[in-house]
Image: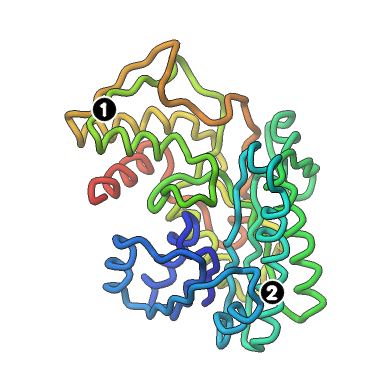
Amino acid sequence: MLVTGAAGFVGLNVVEALLRRGDAVTAFGLEELPERASSLFATLPGTLRTVRGDVRDAGALREAAAGAEGILPFAAITAGAEREAANPESVLEVNLLGLIGTLRAGQAAGTVRRVILPSSSAVYGESAYRLDVLDEVETPPVPITTYGVTKYAAERMGLRLCGLWGLDAVAARIGPAFGPWERATGARDTLSPFFALGEAARDGKTVVLPDGNLPAYDWIYAPDLAAGLLALLDHPAPPHRVVNLGPGSDQSALLFEVAEALAERRPAFRLSRGAEPTIRPNDPRRRGIMAVDRARDFGWQARRTGRGAANAYADWLGGA
């Protein structure tokens, strides 16, 4: 299996999931894998080959794709407004043209059975703030950000080209993720508030969380997300070609649940709530929840939500 952007947040979770079940994995990207990941991956039953390269380099991609049975192309730039304004070309080059180059490499390999196209809940854009439920068929994609635009373009262009080039593909609209392997790499301009909580807990700091309830948000625990991607990868006859991957429920309380789980494990870490929080959601607006009926048709649903996901993440951070 070829995973591009393998040293990124989603990429590392996917590589780990593949290796745990014994797959042969090629991890492709510009960065080396973090030391903790390399040490863990070496103990897992699968085999790992790393190839350093840029998804804009056709030759490097052909080398990486040789012999691959599946491709999960997760190399991407999740740009904030400043980078969008300053250098939108780089976002388009990596997120869309890099995907097309990866698909060409998969076609040339002649061995690829399935491609999982990397879409995102960001494709819903304005619809997410107007509707309670975000459905793959009925909800109009109205992406707002350059990232969301490129993800929708990658989804539609990917399905079109895979059809023309004889590659079997499913597009995964990935919900907002949190959990293991999130770190600052430069590819994601805005990290999650859960990452900030983990850093504060590690350093024994005091944080202030918002007062009251938070707006609806469907956070997905990253290892569960990886399991969903593998379910799409493995299905012998996909019943759908565009699939939401999320918990299917409001998970806005997770910010408090993760904070509490960390405080239980790290006594020096202190919590309070107030009108001037030091850690808060990145998006203050209420969002619709992604429907997950199609994901269930692939035999998958999120296994850890609420306090179960919070405890799992806090336990993982205990080894960081």
Residue in the image at 48% along x and 41% along y: 191
Task: Name the mark nearer the viewer: 1 or 2.
Answer: 1
Q: Position of residue 106 (x, y in %)?
A: 65, 80
Looking at the picture, which amino acid does disc 2 mark? Leu
Q: Position of residue 186 (x, y in %)?
A: 50, 50
Looking at the picture, which amino acid does disc 1 mark? Lys
Q: Is residue 50 left or right of residue 61?
A: left
Q: Which residue is mark 1?
A: 205
Badge 2 element: helix
In the rendered view, would you say 110 is above or below 302?
A: below
Query: Which quadrant would residue 229 be assigned to in this image?
Result: bottom right
250 and 259: which one is in front?
259
Residue farthest to the left?
267
Q: Position of residue 34 (x, y in %)?
A: 35, 61
Residue in the image at 42% along x and 18% along y: 277
Residue in the image at 63% along x and 59% along y: 118
Q: Which label belongs to residue 103? A: 2
